[in-house]
Image (cartoon, grey):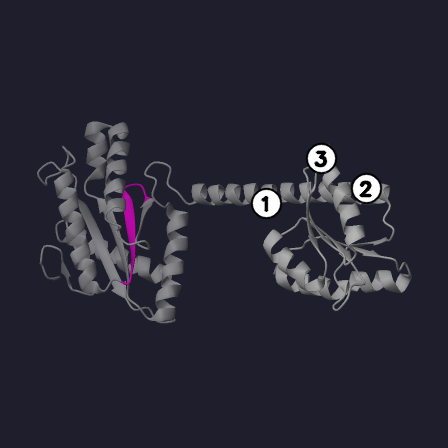
Amino acid sequence: MHYQADPLKILLVDDSLTLRKALSNQLTEQGHQVVEAANAQDALLEFAKFRPDLILLDVVMPGADGYFVARQIRELEAGQWTPIIFLSAKDGDADLWQGIEAGGDDYLTKPVSKVVLTAKLRAMQRLRTMGRRNQEISEELRIANAQLRHLSQTDELTGLLNRRGFDECLLQELRSAQRDQTPLTLILCDIDYFKAFNDKLGHVQGDACLQRVGAILRSVCLRPRDQAARYGGEEFTLVLPHTPKSGAMTYARGLQAVLRQAAITHPGSPFEAKVTLSGGITTCVPDAAATCESLILRADEALYAAKALGRNRFFSFEMQADTTGQVAP
């Protein structure tokens, strides 16, 4: 596998000016960008400002030593990890152990071999390249999973949530309403006499009608959490969080007004040969016993009542009336 050896940003920390300059020149000749620090305080300041790819850190310095600097850097990184290579004249096992415990990744003895240091830097470059590629792959997978999730929850014809997406949305909003004790409205509606529409105009025009109705339902979802979904066939749903029963009835009347203005031709409908909707509304502040199934059943019963009252209307059990003002028998 080929690795592109991009230059490294290196923080070089050593109290010896002579050694710093020698190493700095060597690193610069290899194309790396180097920032120097002579003590622990300067090292921490430069780390915060420079954000290096690698730190070459002297162990023995006046005041705080390199182990202290390494521990401070690990605390500053907050989940990140910058490789640290210690530089020291000490080469005992205990020194190596102490360096690793302090947060170091490698340990080079002084005087530093140019060949060994170059090899270490090349290894760090490869690791950085691999790390970046892993991050890219992770991001690509995240985007792909998000796209797959969107596709699995989206109705292909209308672009609304499909039944799976609706189920998840309703469950989420039900739990939220239960937790916060806020009103939740569910509307279940379908296109009046849609079979007659398909019989007269054909299924291609029927699909176009479903798309237009879907677009209207999407357009009336004005708040971020309002959601329209295609429940199946010519049936649609609207999930309206924070919507009381009076607001739900007003909302339904507004939807009917938008639909009338669209004036979608329906030669099989008795309502001025235009597409209309019948809908059932249920609203509640759900208690712990409420379920998605109970809400859907209640909305479905209200939809049946709207059809029984003559269609082209939305009926609410909670209001005991429909959008025409007719009271339930």
- Between residue 302 and residue 26, name the one nearer to us: 26
Mark 2–mark 3 CB contact (< 8 Å):
no
**Magenta stretch, overall SS:** strand
What number is the disc on residue 3?
3
Q: Earlier in the sequence, mark 1 or mark 3?
A: 3
Query: Which residue is the site of mark 2?
Result: 119
Q: Residue 197, position in %: x, y?
A: 20, 34
In the shown orientation, is residue 133 left or right of residue 115?
left
In the shown orientation, is residue 73 left or right of residue 193?
right
Q: Residue 235 lies in magenta, yes or no?
A: yes
Q: Residue 68, position in %: x, y?
A: 73, 66
**Which image quarter is the C terminus in?**
bottom left
The residue segment tinted magenta is: 232-242
Query: Which residue is the site of mark 1?
Result: 138
Amino acid identity at mark 2: Ala
Residue at (86%, 63%) from the top-left corner?
Answer: 95
